[in-house]
Image (tube, rainbow, N blue to C red):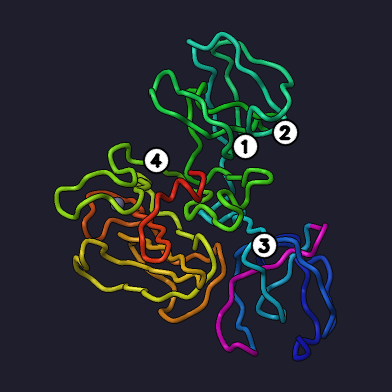
């Protein structure tokens, strides 16, 4: 911005990271990712802004509040490294005893090269997790598409064959080439968070009170992670009040301007303004258990020209 005489460059998205240089007024910049960190007052928009932009091809960041320009709806979003308080936590596990040989891959999925294997009961330490191809967990007896990264390497193993789970503040990495799963313009509203899909509350499940289930329920257990807009658009409902609200509780509805809308229900809090325009990935609130809910979960709907559609047809959960 021309009103900014010197803009600090940081080694991460926040003033808690080292200053590694500065830019002068009106410097044109190209960014390849954005994240959230410490807030600054945008002197033009006259509002607080906690977004940070990454200089293309580097690990250098600048505060969005002092930049003319915004991410596109499909620009890459990176989880803040410390967004759950403290540093990302490593986690441990071991190869299940029922698995005689566990393939190691060069990425999170069986589409990546096999680079070795581990035997039964091998203890392992992981520094990140992601999502990729699914495997049947022989103990939990459910499909699991999570992959865990061996600490300090770029080697991955399928979570389905590991006893052990990420911590709530373990590092999550978007699947490579999969930042917009689905048809190319939708993203998972709980990307980067822990969730399980209620097996009985899939789309179309018959309900006693309200006909068939018009969305999908994503349970987050004891956690109330941030919910991100699945697509950019206009916030047409941002209900942060109390009460039942037709079962939705605290609730956000976004009109994406192309005949599609998304609905996010049972939130613990709503932090977007009704009538505002937001980009895909904007945090709209947190998971909760308001309205017709008995535990923390996100009820998520996609409607096309008013007709509820199965979100699984658009987004890889
Ligand atoms: Zn639901």
The percent position of residue 113, horizontal first and vertical second, equals: 73, 25
Residue to which mark 3 is pinned = 75
Residue to which mark 2 is pinned = 154
> In the rendered structure, does residue 226 fall within the stretch colored magenta?
no
Q: Secondary structure at mark 1?
A: strand
Q: Is mark 3 within 8 Å of ligand 1?
A: no
| Foreground residue among 178 and 130 | 178
Residue to which mark 1 is pinned = 127
Q: Residue at the spot x=64%, y=18% of the render? A: 103
Q: Residue at the spot x=27%, y=49% of the render? A: 295
Residue to which mark 4 is pinned = 196
Could you say which quadrant of the image residue 46 lies in? bottom right
Dot 1 and dot 2 residues touching (CB under 8 Å): no
Magenta stretch in the rendered image: 44-58
Q: Is mark 4 within 8 Å of ligand 1?
A: no
Q: Secondary structure at mark 3?
A: loop
Nearest to N terminus: mark 2 or mark 4:
2
Q: Is residue 192 above or below residue 26?
A: above
């Amino acid at each position: 911005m021309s009103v900014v005489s010197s803009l600090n460059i940081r080694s991460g998205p926040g003033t808690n990271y080292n200053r590694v240089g500065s830019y002068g007024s009106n410097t044109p910049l190209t960014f390849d990712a954005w994240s959230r960190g410490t807030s600054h007052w945008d002197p033009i928009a006259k509002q607080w802004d906690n977004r940070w932009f990454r200089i293309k091809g580097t690990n250098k960041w600048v505060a969005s509040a002092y930049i003319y320009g915004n991410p596109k709806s499909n620009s890459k979003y990176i989880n803040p490294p410390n967004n759950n308080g403290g540093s990302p936590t490593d986690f441990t596990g071991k190869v299940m005893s029922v698995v005689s040989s566990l393939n190691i891959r060069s990425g999170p999925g069986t589409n990546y090269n096999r680079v070795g294997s581990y035997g039964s009961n091998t203890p392992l330490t992981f520094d990140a997790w992601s999502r990729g191809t699914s495997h049947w967990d022989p103990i939990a007896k459910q499909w699991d598409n999570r992959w865990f990264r061996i600490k300090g390497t770029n080697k991955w193993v399928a979570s389905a064959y590991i006893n052990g789970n990420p911590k709530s503040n373990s590092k999550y990495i978007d699947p490579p080439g999969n930042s917009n799963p689905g048809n190319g313009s939708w993203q998972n509203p709980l990307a980067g968070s822990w969730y399980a899909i209620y097996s009985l509350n899939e789309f179309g499940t018959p309900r006693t009170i309200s006909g068939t289930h018009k969305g999908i329920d994503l349970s987050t257990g004891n956690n109330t992670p941030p919910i991100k807009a699945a697509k950019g658009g206009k916030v047409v409902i941002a209900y942060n009040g109390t009460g039942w609200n037709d079962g939705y509780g605290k609730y956000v509805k976004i009109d994406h301007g192309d005949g599609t809308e998304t609905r996010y229900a049972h939130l613990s809090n709503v932090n977007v303004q009704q009538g505002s325009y937001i980009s895909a990935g904007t945090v709209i609130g947190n998971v909760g258990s308001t309205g017709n809910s008995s535990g923390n979960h996100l009820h998520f709907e996609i409607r096309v020209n008013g007709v509820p559609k199965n979100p699984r047809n658009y987004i890889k959960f």
